[in-house]
Amino acid sequence: MKNRLTYKNIEAFVFRLWEREVSEDPISEKEKELLTKWRIRTEKDLDAVHKKESRERILSGLEHYFPQTDISRHSVKRFRTNLYKIAAVIILLLSLGRIFTYTMFIKPDVYLAKSENRIVHLEDGSVVTLLPGAELTVEKSFPASTRVVDLKGDAIFSVAKSKVHPFVVRADGFSTKVLGTVFKISQSGKKKAVDLYEGKVAVSSPGVPVSFLKPNQKWTNFGIAHTTAVISISPVKNSAKKVSAILSLSFNDVPLKEVVTVLESSYSTNISYPKDAEDKKITADFTGGTVGENIESLAFILGLEVQKKENTYILKK
């Protein structure tokens, strides 16, 4: 809105507007519209008891400003009317002040990328590229001793370096903590991932160990709760292709059928197991093992034997 009034003029206008409404003098359609908009915005959060208590408290505080003398019934009525005018203005100004305070000092800043990428520059010098559909929420306290933001969807972060102020991205069901680096967070349904390009990050998710990434490494949960993996991604010489290799893989109370799905896709192999064991919960850390060693460990947990035929591992009683 152009040509905004100064604060003093707004205060005078509010007093005049409420004075006319309380005294039941005619007010313009524009003034009625402004009053209606204000009520919709402010009074929806105030119940009748709250408004009554606020009015009585303000009137009580105003009484000592007026002379305590014998006055006629007409004067009493006029006195009460004037008190209500002043009280109404004060309540209005307090309400408007509360909205202003909340908007300016408390309400978080929310950035949304609709149909295309959106670049957000944060106060600490960090730059966030929101991919389409992503939403970033930044509290008014940012940056503080710990720089914290909330993310929905996918985004690439270029975090300003600080050895004493960690930068934390809280996503859906996991968080990423850094001191200064470049990384990408991806969230597609239940599947979560963090790709690290520069520096170091720590990724934490409920129920599994914290994962520490180095450049060209990726953290993922494969879309399965209580599952975590760190994958090394290396470029192929003289080619645009990249080769991935699992560095760590952990499950905490995960059904066997989901563990097998991860192992099969990660190691490009097939695993056969008894149907009645598919819902058995598995807790295991397969870090550092080969595909054969990891499947042997899984069979040991289940109390089964392993037989291999070509590219298929058969777990049997």
Image (tube, grey):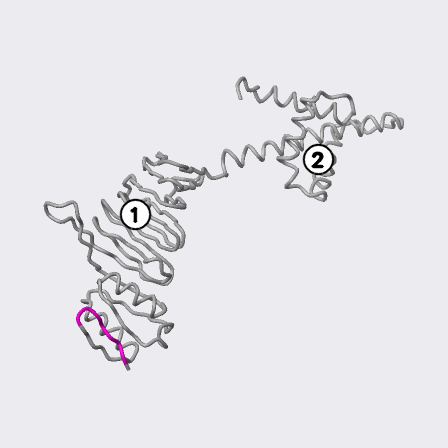
Residue 57, image x and y in percent?
71, 38
Q: Is residue 193 above or below residue 87?
A: below
Q: Is residue 178 above or below residue 295?
A: above
Q: Which residue appears at 15% of the width and 48% of the height?
A: 235
How many tags in the picture? 2
Q: Which residue appears at 33% of the width and 45% of the height?
A: 167
Camera-nearest residue between 140 and 119: 119
Camera-nearest residue between 156 and 255: 255
Residues drawn in magenta: 310-316
Q: Which residue appears at 73% of the width and 24% of the height?
A: 19
Main SS class of the magenta portion in the image: strand
Residue furthest top as drawn: 3
Let me know if residue 85 is in the magenta part. no
Q: Amino acid at mark 2?
A: Ile
Q: Which residue is mark 1?
A: 178
Q: Helix, strand or loop at disc 1?
A: strand
Residue 21 quadrant: top right
Residue 47, image x and y in percent?
69, 43
Q: Which residue is mark 2?
A: 58
Q: Which residue appears at 34% of the width and 53% of the height?
A: 192
